[in-house]
Structure formats: C-alpha cells, structure tokens
Image: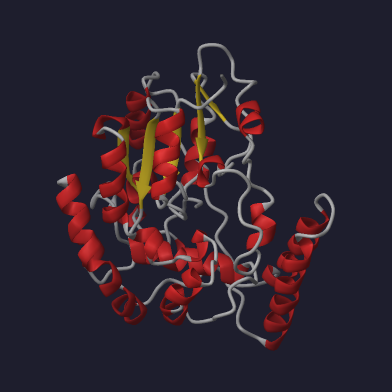
Amino acid sequence: MALPDFLIIGAPKAGSTALHAALAQHPGLYMSPVKEPKFFLSDGPPPARGGPGDAQTYREHVWRRADYEALFDAAPAGTLRGESTPLYLHDPAAHRRIHELIPQAKLIAVLRDPVERAHSNWTHLWSAGLEPIGDFVQACEEEPRRIEAGWASFWHYVSLGRYGEQLDHLYEVFPRGQVLIIRYLNLVDDPGATLDRICAFLGVEPGVISTVPRENVTAHPEATLRYRTLARTLRVAAAAGSFLPGNAGTALKDSLEHRLQRSAPSRQPLNWDEREQVLPKFKGDIRRLEEITGDDFSFWLRPRERSGGMVGSRPAGQRQARNGQPRVPA
C-alpha cells in the first residue's frame, strides 16, 4: 500500500505550506503533490454545504482511498512519504482515522501564537472575499453560530488555536514519541536547526535542507464599496461554482479574488486592543498546553506583536519582518 509514513497535522496558518515545500527538497522524503488532500477529515465524501466557499472546497478533498494512495505512487524506493493537512490536529475523529489506517505514522504539529494564528486565518478569508465581517474581534464572536450552522473548520478561528485540548486528545490516541511539536517562530527564526530537528525525528539525514520559502504577504483590501460589491459577487460565485463542471468554478472565483486583492495593502499587524479582547478565549487552553507539554508558552500572553517562539534566536536587528509579521507562508 502507498500510504504516508508521516503527516504534518497542524496548525492552519502556521507555516505548513512552507514546511511542506522545504521537506520536499530532501532526497530522503517524498511529499504528496497535492499538499493538503484532507483524506482523514471524513469517512466517505465530505459535506456538500457549509459557509461561503465551503462547498467548492469540499470538492477538492481527496476522500477516496484509491485516489489518496495514488498520491504516493511516484515515491522513489526507500523514501519516506508525507503529506500536510493542517486541519488534522483540530479534528479528534481524524486522529482516530489516522491511527486506524497508519498507526505507526509520525506526526508533526507546528504551533503558532493562537491569537496571531486566528488573525491570519481571518485575514486570509477576508482577502479572499469570503469573510463577510470586516472586524476581526466580531468575526471571532460569530464562531459558535457558524459552528452550529455547519461552517467548515477553517472558519473556526478560536477553536483551531486550542492546542491544549487538541494535543490532550491526540496523546490519548498516539504515543508521545510519534508526535513532534514545533514552534512556528522557531521555523521562522532558525529554519536550519528546526528542519534538522524534524529530519532527526523522521530518521533521515539532517543538514541537507536549511531554508524554507519566503512568504507572499497576504493582502488586506479595505472595506470599500468596490470591495464589498466584489466580495458579495465572489461569495455568490463560490456557491454557484460548486455546480459548475470541472475547474470552471475555481477559475471564476480565482479571477474575482485577483481583482479584490489587486493593489491592496499587505496584512495589517494585530493591535494590542484587538489582541486583548480575543486573548481571554485562549488563556485557559494555553495553561493546559503547558501542563500537557511541560513547556513554557507564557510568551503568548504578553502584549507584543510577535509571539510564540524562542526569544533571541535571531540578532535583534533581524527579529521583526515587515509590519511585525513573520516572513513564512502559512
């Protein structure tokens, strides 16, 4: 059977795209050509409906086992096979499905400051024209109603960052020795050492890869009349696109999204007022994460723009990228 030996399981907006691309450069590893197949997120076909754009996204799921195994058919003999679906960490049912099919799989979780992660997640959907609420804090408050309405998990800005409860369940299913926890800012600030740590965990030669791709900074269109008109059109197109043949729906959505983002400024940094309003949603879970891992994550509770990694891993003049945002793609 052509099944993966390891999975990058989370978290969304925490550098999984960069890590996938970096690991694909190692001759001892083979990464699936579909970066995010989402195979373990469902038993059978995914739901047909959800939030804005969800139906079209569900069409992209590789949910048939034969199609999933085919992703790894081209792996050279002797290489370790891997894929990256950052929503797996959030989904307890996915933990069980992974264990049932590949119980010896090694799992890699990259954890980012949960408030920054949520803000990046919200910006991603706002930039794509799918998020109807132009205020980050208000969008977080809508989460319970969206969950009840069946919106897909990528809309769950808060619950996707509750790493403590996620790891608590994961460790009930998998031995801790099969799980590697990486801090997002370590991937940003010291990619060489972080990649070596991952390679050692997987059992392939370290020192072969040392860099991760630089990010394309997410655009943040202003809430002008033009933006709102295009965004409404895009949401309608995304819903209709799920009924169009082939890739016609995706092409239409991509065209509208490109128009939305044209000449838009880069993502704005999260300010302390916004952070202070959202942070209480995570405080208890951060303490839970510390108890589970034995590591200190109190840095995430402090009023600073960059949170979540090791302090001092770069020279002081190099620690902050443009607008205070780490320069690694999510």
Q: Is residue 301 above or below residue 292?
A: below
Report whether 207 appears left or right of 245. left
Measured as percent of width and height from the top left, residue 148 is found at 48, 71
Measured as percent of width and height from the top left, residue 221 is found at 61, 75
Towards the viewer: 31 or 22: 31
Towards the viewer: 293 or 28: 293
Report whether 157 appears left or right of 232. left
Measured as percent of width and height from the top left, residue 115 is found at 35, 66
The residue most toward the top is: 77
Q: Is residue 155 above or below residue 18?
A: below
Towards the viewer: 164 or 220: 164
The residue most toward the bottom is: 225
Residue 225 found in image quarter: bottom right
Q: Is residue 67 above or below residue 136?
A: above
At horizontal 52% and vertical 19% (from top left) the residue drawn is 27
Q: Is residue 134 above or below residue 152?
A: below
